[in-house]
Image (tube, grey):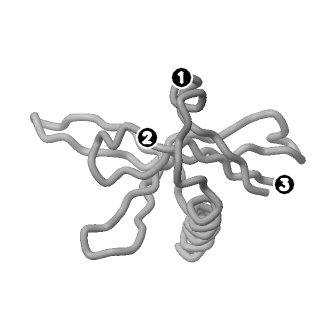
Amino acid sequence: MSIHVHFISNDKGNPPGKLADAELHFTAGPLTGLKLVGFAVWERRSGGLALTWPARSYSVNGERRSFALLRPVSDGAAQDALRDLILDAYRTFARDAEPVITDDERSNGPRRAALR
């Protein structure tokens, strides 16, 4: 199975601290042609990066909760490996990003990039 991580920059800065949305694009194996959306890269107040996972929110007795859509089968380390993969790819994406946005880029919408 081959996975490509795609980022969509949060150029508007809303909500504060959100840096980009991330998607996993599958290019080989039984999931070829599909993508998993719902990841987001955030800047921690204390510094560093955080990653949120695809989730569905719901209410129980008026209390909002969320249900993670991507879960480990048995070993939580699998989640850590994917988190590290996405955050490392984001660091590369951010390092290689152009610091200046031209008017053409601004009118063409958010900047998209892919990492393999």
Asked where in the image residue 81 lies, by quadrant, the reply is: bottom right
Local SS, label 2: loop
Q: Viewed as shown, does residue 109 lie left or right of 19? A: right
Q: Which comes sooner in the sequence, label 3 or label 1?
A: 3
Q: Is residue 24 left or right of residue 57?
A: right
Quarter of the rendering containing residue 12: top left
112 versus 76 height, above or below: above
Please give the residue where the numbered disc 2 appears in the rendered image: 11
The amino acid beneath tag 2 is: Asp
Q: How would you rate the neighbour count of disc 2 (Cα within 10 Å): few for under 14, some for 14-19, many for 20 or more?
A: some
Q: Nearer the viewer, residue 54 or 105?
A: 105
Q: Position of residue 55 (x, y in %)?
A: 42, 44
Q: Residue furthest toward the right? A: 28
Tag on residue 107?
1
- Of tags 2 and 3, which is closer to the observer? 2
As shown in the figure, which amino acid type bears the numbered disc 1? Ser
Q: Are marks 3 and 1 in contact (CB under 8 Å)?
A: no
Neighbourhood count class around disc 1 (C-alpha, 10 Å): few under 14, some 14–19, many 20 upward? few
Indicate the position of residue 18 as horizontal and vertical percent values: 37, 50
Q: What SS does tag 1 mark?
A: helix
**Quadrant of the frame with the N terminus:** bottom right
Where is residue 65 shown, x and y percent of the image? 24, 44
N-terminal label among 2 and 3? 3
Q: CA distance from mark 1 to mark 2?
A: 12 Å
Query: Mark 1–mark 2 contact, CB under 8 Å?
Result: no
Near-viewer residue (26 or 94): 94
**Which quadrant is home to the C terminus?**
bottom right
Where 62 sits versus 40, above or below?
above
Q: Earlier in the sequence, mark 1 or mark 2?
A: 2
Furthest residue toward top = 107
Residue at 52 percent across and 57 percent down: it is: 71
Q: Which mark is residue 2?
A: 3
